[in-house]
Image (spheres, rainbow, N blue to C red):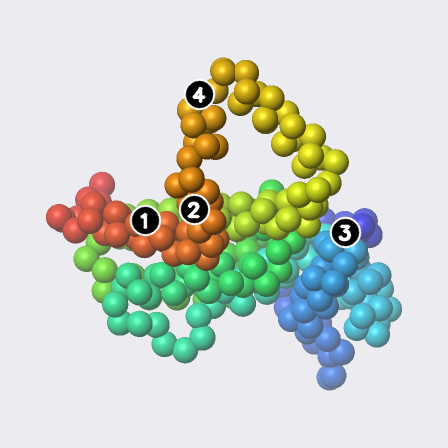
Amino acid sequence: MFEATPHNPVPLWSRPEPRTRRPRFSREQIADAALALADAEGFDAVSMRRIAAALGAGTMSLYRYIATKADLLALIDDALLGEALVPGDLPADWRQAISLVARQTRRAYLNHPWAVQTLQGKPAADASLAGPNGLRHFEQSLAALDGAPLSTRAKLDLLAIVDDYVFGHLLHAAELTESVLAGADSPEATAAGEFIAAQLASGDFPHLRALAEDPAAASVGELAIDGRFELGLRLLIDGIAHQGEPGPHDD
């Protein structure tokens, strides 16, 4: 998918962009072209050759801007975090502010449904947090909690847990999307349904069978994914806030 290039031990963000009188491209333009390709055709379509063609450039000329696959992944990660930034001012209430950050992050990745599953675990040249948008996103998250009556440790714990929740939700949403695209009438779905029905009829799973026959369970399943996200986010933030309010718990 990517051309083989030598590893550069210097992080991408520490390297200056090409300095010419009139540079043809910026790293942001390269990232935008990569995102557009992935959105249109899937991440497997992203290559230096395809990006160069989209920009009207020669493939080798792009290596003046990024040297490796890891560089490109770092650019894409940072571009996504740029979309995760909340525009304008944050609410004064810290719970509303961090909720808004979480919603914007979710929205950014839902706009690129391939991103969470595809980029998970792929090595980048340096942590996306070290990029300009990664730093802005972290700064904005800290600003959201500026007025929270929590210790530094509690604030960092809250940010990490909210991130875990948001990205776990995004992974689940991506799985649901794939399931819907596959279709309930697909051979795989039909075979899975027949297997489950046979298992429930065996009597070995009385609680699952009772759940399947309970009308209340169907109404829970119909809860929109947006509503479930909002419910979970509110319970999560309220729970952490309640735990942290009695006093600081720094080590």
- Which residue, given by chain and number where applicable, does mark 3 sit on? 44
Q: Is residue 218 left or right of residue 63?
A: left
Residue shown at the point (59%, 58%) measured from the top left = 77
Distance from Cα at disc 1 to Cα at disc 3: 35 Å
Mark before the other along the chain sequence, 2 or 1:
2
Distance from Cα at disc 1 to Cα at disc 4: 31 Å
Distance from Cα at disc 2 to Cα at disc 1: 23 Å
Q: Residue furthest left?
A: 246
- Which residue, given by chain and number where applicable, does mark 1 sit on? 236
- Which residue, given by chain and number where applicable, does mark 4 sit on? 206
Q: Which quarter of the image is occupied by the C terminus?
A: top left
Is any part of residue 128 visible from this angle? Answer: yes
Query: Which label is found at residue 216?
Result: none
Mark before the other along the chain sequence, 4 or 3:
3
**Image-quadrant location for residue 54:** bottom right
Mark before the other along the chain sequence, 1 or 4:
4
Residue in the foreground of this view, choosing between 249 and 102? 102
Residue 230's spot in the image, x, y percent? Answer: 38, 56
Identify which amino acid the numbered label 3 is placed on.
Asp
Mark before the other along the chain sequence, 2 or 4:
4
Q: Are marks 1 and 3 in contact (CB under 8 Å)?
A: no
- Which residue, given by chain and number where applicable, does mark 2 sit on? 219
Distance from Cα at disc 4 to Cα at disc 3: 44 Å
1 vs 4, front mark: 4
Residue shown at the point (73%, 40%) measured from the top left = 186
Q: Residues within 10 Å of mark 3 (few under 14, many from 20)?
A: few
2 vs 1, front mark: 2
